[in-house]
Image: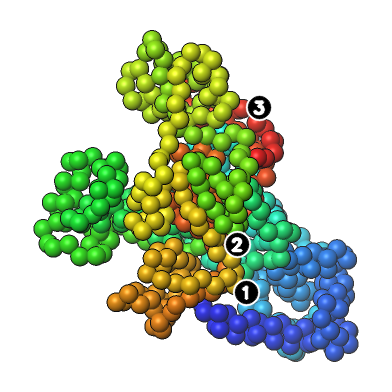
């Protein structure tokens, strides 16, 4: 059962009243005038200094956003100590149920306050357990509020960020985000180790989106870590792919009226015998809209994930809320002006030598060419994804190098918004206005494809299109006002990046933090013979354009 916002509000009110009542009684037992427990902040100062007898800096830590939550719970723990209770059972029970336990301590004639705590001799095991609890709690607070370490698993940001780079991600710069699923195994993202699909969390308690005040908002060209928007639903056997892309592919396979572009996309993604197998398996009955989705649910195990448990992605923020974005011939334009390209931006190039000679492993290593960014055409020709520096060096070695580029006007069904009404592709895209909180758009049968995902999935409305009319929450709608800011993310490896061009906008509640620097970089490629070696030249390298 999920906690609604109303239920959560009621629980918070009960918690506050229980704590306040308990504090009145505890102040009285500690010899402090009880009415002082009603004065905001001053009551915390007295609680810290005169009840649990802690230093002044405890009060300052209590005032730090989110850290204050853990300080509050730890202060309750210390208060329970001052009533002579040191066993784990009363400490855990009293901390979790403090709205009832604190009034009990404050008003029960059986419970007496102890100002000067006697020295408690702890066993070696108890000392280790206390130290472990403190270390886990401290690490969890740091991980949630300050920074977290991530690794780069794919080449979508090559060569700005390389496979094997370990990132330090700043979580407080954009504001600290409260977990949506607070009941989870610490330090485990969404799946328990050594299991196939066992969840590391429970949604018995599910909190609404809440973020502390940001130092500054997401800016153009920031490298951002965020939860994968298309990851709200996952086909477990194909977790690395977009569930919605898989559904669109199955629809095209089973729809006899699919467009040539949609058919071509399917044949690019699947072997002919695989397509034939699915068509034979699911094509015996007449086609209907949604048949592809039904086939995917029969073929795979499909689950839903809350926002904070979706996979983490890292991309560059190309456009922020309110920007108008357009891509013409690979060049990004923001609000009508050519955007500054990252220094190590990469594209796909056909590389050919008149003699048929291929680049050797040694040369590829010297040029820092990612082995996953190479596609073989034949013995004489290959496709490499290169930055300008790598391209120029290869040309000087006598190779012919030609960039690959989608032509303007060619419809790519894998590109957002996946509608023939928008003949966009990865090199020619838009114009598209990035939604901002409070911005209103007029809706029609064409542009609903741009905003359907936002209205239905991200902002939790019921959306239907019937007989050409758009219904939002069962009412005819001709416009919509956005409730959140959105962002458009792209990888620096522009021809090998699953990004906003493919799945659309990133909502603000999906933002995790800003990637600040590479603290470790380890070579991952067996081909070079250096697997496991540290790239010392990338250690503690700040992430820039």
Image-based side of 304 in relation to 10, left or right: left
Q: Quadrant of residue 183?
A: bottom right
The residue mark sitting in front, 3 or 2, is 2
Q: Along the line of sight, which residue is nearer the eye, 74 or 199?
A: 199
Q: Position of residue 388 (x, y in %)?
A: 56, 28
Q: Is mark 1 on a helix, strand or loop?
A: helix
Instruction: Please tell me the numbered disc located at residue 322.
Output: 2
Q: Distance between the residues labelled 1 and 3?
A: 47 Å
Q: How crowded is mark 3: few (under 14 residues within 10 Å), some or many (20 or more)?
A: few
Give whichever of discs 1 and 2 has the lower sequence position: 1
**Residue behind mark 1:** 96
116 over 245 or under it: above or below: below
Q: Tag 3, which secondary structure?
A: helix
User: Quick check: can you spot residue 110?
Assistant: no
Residue denoted by label 3: 536
| Front residue of this view, candidates 89 and 545 | 545
Which residue is found at the position 36% from the left and 25% from the top? 376
> Which-is-in-front pick, marks 1 and 2?
2
The quadrant of the image that shows the N terminus is bottom left
Q: How many marks?
A: 3
Residue 421 in sight in this render? yes
Residue at the spot x=55%, y=79% of the render?
A: 5
Residue 380 horizontal/vertical position (percent): 35, 17
- Which of 66/436 is in front? 436
In the rendered image, residue 38, in percent from the top left (x then y), is placed at 81, 86
* Relative horizontal placement of residue 76, taking residue 14 as reference (left or right): right
Residue 487 appears in which quarter of the rendering? bottom right
* Mark identifier at residue 155: none
């Amino acid at each position: 059962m999920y906690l609604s916002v109303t239920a959560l509000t009621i629980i918070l009110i009960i918690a506050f009243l229980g704590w306040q009542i308990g504090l009145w009684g505890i102040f009285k037992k500690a010899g402090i005038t009880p009415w002082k427990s009603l004065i905001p902040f001053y009551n915390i100062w007295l609680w810290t200094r005169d009840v649990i007898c802690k230093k002044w800096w405890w009060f300052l830590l209590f005032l730090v956003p989110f850290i204050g939550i853990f300080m509050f719970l730890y202060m309750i723990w210390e208060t329970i100590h001052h009533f002579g209770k040191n066993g784990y059972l009363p400490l855990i029970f009293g901390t979790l149920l403090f709205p009832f336990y604190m009034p009990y301590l404050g008003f029960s004639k059986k419970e007496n306050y102890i100002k000067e705590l006697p020295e408690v001799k702890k066993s070696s095991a108890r000392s280790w357990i206390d130290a472990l609890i403190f270390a886990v709690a401290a690490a969890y607070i740091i991980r949630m509020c300050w920074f977290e370490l991530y690794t780069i698993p794919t080449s979508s940001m090559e060569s700005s960020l390389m496979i094997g780079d370990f990132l330090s991600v700043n979580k407080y710069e954009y504001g600290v985000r409260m977990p949506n699923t607070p009941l989870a195994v610490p330090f485990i993202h969404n799946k328990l180790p050594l299991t196939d699909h066992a969840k590391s969390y429970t949604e018995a308690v599910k909190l609404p989106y809440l973020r502390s005040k940001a130092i500054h908002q997401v800016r153009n060209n920031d490298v951002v870590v965020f939860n994968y928007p298309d990851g709200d639903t996952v086909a477990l056997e194909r977790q690395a792919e977009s569930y919605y892309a898989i559904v669109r592919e199955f629809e095209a396979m089973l729809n006899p009226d699919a467009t040539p572009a949609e058919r071509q996309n399917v044949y690019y993604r699947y072997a002919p015998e695989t397509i034939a197998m699915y068509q034979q398996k699911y094509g015996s009955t007449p086609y209907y809209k949604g048949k592809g989705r039904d086939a995917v649910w029969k073929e795979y195990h499909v689950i839903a994930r809350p926002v904070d448990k979706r996979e983490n992605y890292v991309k560059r923020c190309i456009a922020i809320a309110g920007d108008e974005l357009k891509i013409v011939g690979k060049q990004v334009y923001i609000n009508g002006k050519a955007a500054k390209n990252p220094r190590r931006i990469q594209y796909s190039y056909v590389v050919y030598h008149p003699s048929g000679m291929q680049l050797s492993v040694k040369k590829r290593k010297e040029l820092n060419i990612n082995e996953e960014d190479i596609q073989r055409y034949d013995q004489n020709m290959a496709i490499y994804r290169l930055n300008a520096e790598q391209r120029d060096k290869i040309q000087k070695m006598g190779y012919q190098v030609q960039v690959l580029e989608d032509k303007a006007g060619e419809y790519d069904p894998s590109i957002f918004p996946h509608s023939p009404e928008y003949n966009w592709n990865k090199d020619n895209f838009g114009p598209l206005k990035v939604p901002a909180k409070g911005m209103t758009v007029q809706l029609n049968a064409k542009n609903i494809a741009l905003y359907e995902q936002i209205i239905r999935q991200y902002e939790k409305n019921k959306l239907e299109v019937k007989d050409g009319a758009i219904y939002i929450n069962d009412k005819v709608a001709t416009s919509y006002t956005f409730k959140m800011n959105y962002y458009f993310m792209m990888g620096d490896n522009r021809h090998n990046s699953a990004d906003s061009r493919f799945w659309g906008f990133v909502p603000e509640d999906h933002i995790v933090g800003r990637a600040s620097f590479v603290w470790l970089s380890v070579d991952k490629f067996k081909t070079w013979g250096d697997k496991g070696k540290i790239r010392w030249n990338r250690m503690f390298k700040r992430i820039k354009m």
